[in-house]
Image: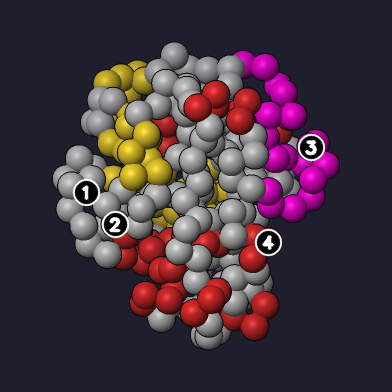
Amino acid sequence: MGILAADDIPTQAIIEPGEDQTRSGEYVKHPGDGKLMVHIPEGIFLSGEDDDPVWVDDFHIDTFPTTNADYARFCAATRHPVPEHWENGRCPRELYDHPVVHVTWRDASAYARWAGKSLPTAEQWEKAARGTSGRTFPWGDQKTAAKCNVRETGVERTTSVSRYHSGVSPYGVYDMVGNVWEWLATPTAPGRYELRGSAYTSPLFRGVPAVPNDADDTMHDDDTGFRCVATPEQMTSRKV
């Protein structure tokens, strides 16, 4: 694994929306990794391409995808191998607030355990992205690529996880479409798990939150990352 120098481990890299960007979400910091999370209340939401009613218990979800800065603290605390794109095994400072990539499902699960959280189920992730009323995208039904980092946007790389304020979900969750694909806890076959949300490499239509993707749990790429969820019990216990 790479060696993280002391001054390469961010200690103050918690990202928060400004007051004018706060939506209906109830933002709180998790006692484990300190990341800002949004409360998703229990209840029924319209799920999948057929908008089937599905009940989901209440939970919290990370407001932003796991960043390089978040992952650097995890690697430093656990000596977990660092992502291959970090130069000389160190987190590039200009990427602190970008989503971490080149992480496998196993890497994402290890971070979640360390933080005292879990990876989202498909139902949890989709509800956090779409809300309850079956909207096509987090921001509504309009096909507006400018609200996220997808192929049509033309950025061609990851961006800060707090950049796309107008594309947040009804609960105030960022980057649920574009930037990076996100690993989920839901298996599709032995050794394979769901991904959702698409990435900067994907066209907008691939980011529709109701439509799943999947991959082998050892796959890692420059457009794949993750975020975590927490149950009410995990919000009150510190495991880091």
Disc 2 residue type?
A: Gly
Q: Which labelled disc corresponds to residue 94?
A: 4
Residue 150 among magenta residues: yes
The answer to which of marks 4 and 2 sits earlier in the sequence is 2
The answer to which of marks 1 and 2 sits earlier in the sequence is 2
The answer to which of marks 4 and 3 sits earlier in the sequence is 4
Mark 2 and mark 3: Cα distance apart in space? 35 Å
List the residue tagged with mark 3: 153
Query: x%, y% of residue 64?
Result: 50, 44
- Relative depth, front residue between 229 and 9: 9
Residue at x 29%, y 57% (from the top left corner)? 32
- Relative depth, front residue between 52 and 143: 143
Residue 51 picture quarter: top left
Mark 1 and mark 2: Cα distance apart in space? 9 Å
The reply to whether discs 1 and 2 touch (Cβ–Cβ < 8 Å) is yes
Residue at x 47%, y 58% (from the top left corner)? 12
Q: Which element type, helix, strand or loop, lies under badge 2?
A: loop
Mark 4 and mark 2: Cα distance apart in space? 25 Å
Disc 3 residue type?
A: Thr
Q: Which element type, helix, strand or loop, lies under badge 3?
A: helix
Residue 58 picture quarter: top left
The reply to whether discs 4 and 1 touch (Cβ–Cβ < 8 Å) is no
The reply to whether discs 2 and 3 touch (Cβ–Cβ < 8 Å) is no
List the residue tagged with mark 1: 234
Mark 4 and mark 1: Cα distance apart in space? 31 Å
Question: Which residues fall within the magenta stretch?
Answer: 141-159
- Tell me the quadrant of the picture where the C terminus can be found: bottom left
Q: Which element type, helix, strand or loop, lies under badge 1?
A: loop
